[in-house]
Image: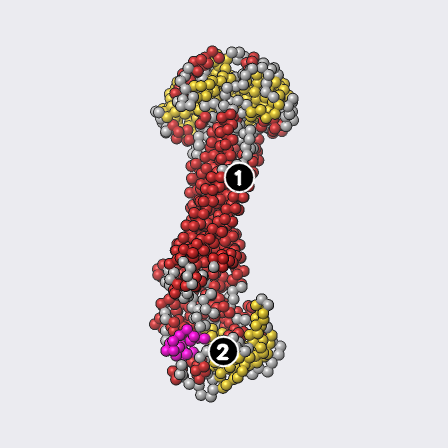
Amino acid sequence: MIEALNKKLMRDLWRIKGQMLAIILVMACGISTFIMSFGVIDSLKLSQDVYYDRYQFADVFAQLQRAPQGIKQQVMDIPGVSAVEMRVVFGVTIQVDGMDEPATGKLISLPDGRTPLLNNLYLRRGRMLYPDEDGAILSSEAFADAHGFALGDRISMVINGHRQALKIVGIVLSPEYVYSLGPGALFPDDKRFGTFWMSQRSLEAAVDMDGAFNDISIRMDRGGNQENIKQELDIILKPYGGLISYGRDEQMSNWFVQNEMDQLRVMGYFAPVIFLCVAAFLVNVVMTRQVATQREQIGMLKAVGYTNGEISLHYLKMVLMVVVVGSILGVGTGVWLGAGMTNMYTQFFHFPILQFSFSAEVMIFSVLFCTVSAVIGTLTAIRAAAKLPPAEAMRPESPTHFRRTFLERMGLEKYFSHLFRIVIRHVERRPVRTLFSTVGIGLSMSILIFAFFMEDSINYMLEVQFDMAQREDISLGFVEPRSINALEEIRLLPGVLKVEPVRSVAVFLKFGHYAKRSSIMGLAPEPDLHRILDRDLRAARIPEQGLALSSKLAEVLHVKKGDILTVEVLEDRRPTLKIRVAEIVEEFIGLSAFMNIDQLNQHLNEGAVITGAFVMVDPLWNGPLFQKIKDIPAIASMNILKKAREIFRDIIGENILKMVAMNIIFASLISFGVIYNTARIALSERGRELASLRVLGLTRGEVAYILFGEMTIIILMAIPVGLGIGYLMVLGMAQSMDTELFRIPVIVDKDTYGLSVIIVIVSSVLSFYLVWRQVENIDLVSAQKGVE
Amino acid sequence: MSENNGVNGNITFRTEGLTKDYVTGETVVQALRGVTLEIPKGDMVVLLGPSGSGKSTFLNIIGGLDSPTSGEVYFKKDKLSDYSEQQLTRFRRHNVGFVFQSYNLVPSLTAYENVALVTDIALDPIPPMEALKAVNLENRARHFPSQLSGGEQQRVAIARALAKRPEVLLCDEPTGALDSETGIVVLKALQEVNKNYGTTTIIITHNAAIADMADRVIYFGDGQVVDVKVNKNPVGPEEISW
């Protein structure tokens, strides 16, 4: 007997295969986004943990001007410190054949004759350095690969004013530079920034740091108090020009990896919940209908002695079959997407090994999550089947009760055609289903808005950053502060059209018990190239007195216009100043403070000094100019903003495009699933009614109007709902991405709303078309027969 | 239509050698095996015959719901069997009123609106209220089907059918789901429509007694017309013995 029931199950499933397929696809989306997100998090976490652990990634970091290595014992004596590594880290410019513009790099010392205790290197190819080896370096893999450097190739660097051709003997990776960002750069650019390691003795000699260091890393004991260690370390390093120390949470590379995982986690919960809720709703609609059409069969089964349990199980099995297929598809797609995404991360994150892997728990949890949501969706339908007394079940359902709708009762009746009345009374009769359909379609629209928003806001951010704020073509950074006269020298370089000075100084800002490490950028009173923007994004004057803070920095420090900040300068004589906040300005990237350059120099008791320059260049002269700059040892860094933008567009843009494409597919599947199922069920519920109308002489078009009219109203209602949810999702996203490094402006183009609505409408039209083909086949003769 | 086919102006339907085969899998069911008939204008016709004798198939074909396998159907001077799907829809829309055994009212529309649904698309309709009056339901106009009894629902269906002033009224077992008392009320309504509006009315029934109220009784058997009787003195429904 059960055999026969199982046969019925398979045949019933086959009969509603279109609807079941729609549900399977939505379920698969839910499972796959879950597996993808958490699989990628697992993979990143695993790579990170293993890497940090095996290669002794440090816990506390600090940079300073110069200290004798003899203070090591003082640092070791801080309670909780288990290992200390002191290094020399020095900025260099690099000349690469075939590349006009210079690249910059960081040269880091490696202890001679022993492996480093902290931040050890992973050797990808070649060998480590011999003790005291001269003229040899290890290169970061990203830089070597970006330029196609092989072992034995020589890299030409300007180190402390001297050009040296250094031989690459090994290609390495470092846990400190999983994500590697050049000084002043906004995005990683492996072609223009690299990290290199050199024998400590050689480097000390090259940069006049014999017996000294300017960079320190510390590993804590288990249970060590990081705050204490940082405080005591700062006290020890203060006389040596120590900048404020920081932990892993502020270490640039680690921060980016961590931040990426946090965002994935948000997406990993968010997306599957949406998909599986929609799937549960669709399961509910389809199964309720299934039980309704099979009323008489259920009555018969009960009459011949099937128990409620057996009948419930029968329908539950039907849904579980769908869950099984959806899970297989979802897990497969999730693994595929996860592998693709992990592969994308290898472009940004340089781990020794980063492979997509996911734990059994992730898979089990996603399938369980899907099963539970589907079962919840089925429960009400099954309850109806179980409750039906057999005698009643075998009679056809009594006609559904309708009444005038709210709008009609309000007296709008006379404006509605009779066909339209059928439509709106149906919409109103099943408020819960109407609500869920509306929300379902709305959600699909909001997913699209969300995807396009990422594109909009990034474009907007780029526009503000590059077209309105940082309008210079290149920015130059000097090795050390120089007289303002250097500006004149730069002005005389080939192709230079305009030059503006900048004086940048590292500071520790304090207000009450809030404190933040930052830098103050001294700018010309009315900068034309590197501008600051007020909240309406108009170019703002640099205040004559006081500081202009970026809004995020003001938020972090809890200060407002007029407050007096304590400014601890972290350079040279390290004065502590009191400066008033004169202006709050808008900035999407970084945590900056701005000041009039002359005033800043006065505060610092220095003459007219600059640390860099913003330059506008005639692009025809790029080649000769860059050639010239490569030969100027005083220039430590050079950022070409146009290149930064291109790189961003190439790498990030491409990935965003993929994400948008994925979201379009997901959203279309949801709206298709909801619309197709709802229309298909309306057709099934009202097939006979529609057939009679055709017999009475209504055209197919008029019948379709009734059927699709209901869906059209739901779609129309879903538009504002979708726009609303979409905007909330955008706000939520902006909030979760509102970090100290960058903010995402909440900018949604009109086009984004328009496009999202259009995509949903297109997928509706497709669903309509599929149902329409069934309307064409309505059997007119069947209208005269009894209930289906 | 190039030929007149000699149809005289008093004939509403004429069929010639009408056959209909239903193919299901490997078996072919011959529902009609050559039906040749004439139905005069304004007649009240009753089709009698056992289940599967072809009555319903015949009604579906002349009503434009189904097409014959072979043979010809003329509605007045027009050859229905050549009509396209669209022409058939137009034919139903303007010329035919249907009444079904299971009423087939739109549950989400009131009695009045169910009638209005048809008058909206008819060329020269009777106002819906007047049509409801014709079946004595004017005081139930604002009720939904779920608030009406079976007999009332069927009378709404008749009002809906007659409201477009159809040339023909086709009724498949109109009293099949009703008790005799209610059945009489429904039949009376049909007879009044036939008399007052001169609508050619064709009724399929299992109830031979109903034949007494017809002008013409056509007996079906095994897909063919077995006999046609013309009734000189039709009686009122209330005189029929059930």
Real-space CA distance between mark 1 and mark 2, rounded to the nearest whole angstrom: 68 Å
The quadrant of the picture occupied by the C terminus of chain B is bottom left
Where residue B236 sits, quadrant-wise, is: bottom left
* Badge 2 density bin: few <14, some 14–19, many ≥20, Cα 10 Å: few
Type of the residue with mark 2: Pro
Visible residue check, residue A103: no
Q: Which residue is mark 1?
A: A338
Q: Position of residue B36 (x, y in %)?
A: 57, 80
Q: Horizontally, is A497 left or right of B190 in the view?
A: right
Disc ID at residue A605: none
Q: Vertical placement of B60 versus A619: above or below?
A: below
Residue lying at 44% horizontally and 27% vertically, measured from the top left: A249
Q: Position of residue A35 (x, y in %)?
A: 49, 41
Helix, strand or loop at disc 2?
A: loop
Please state the chain letter of the residue tagged with numbered disc 2 in the rendered image. B
| Residues shaded magenta | B173-190
Q: Are marks 1 and 2 on the same chain?
A: no
Residue lying at 57% horizontally and 18% vertically, measured from the top left: A198
Q: Which residue is mark 2?
A: B50
* Badge 1 density bin: few <14, some 14–19, many ≥20, Cα 10 Å: many
In the current view of this chain or complex, which residue is farthest to the bottom?
A: B232
Q: Nearer the viewer, mark 1 or mark 2?
A: 2
Type of the residue with mark 1: Gly
Q: Main secondary structure of the magenta part?
A: helix
Q: Is residue B182 magenta?
A: yes
Q: Vertical placement of A214 versus A746: above or below?
A: above
Residue lying at 41% horizontally and 61% vertically, measured from the top left: A305
Q: Nearer the viewer, residue A353 or A540?
A: A353
Helix, strand or loop at disc 1?
A: helix
Q: Position of residue B56 (x, y in %)?
A: 51, 74
In the current view of this chain or complex, which residue is farthest to the front?
A: A1
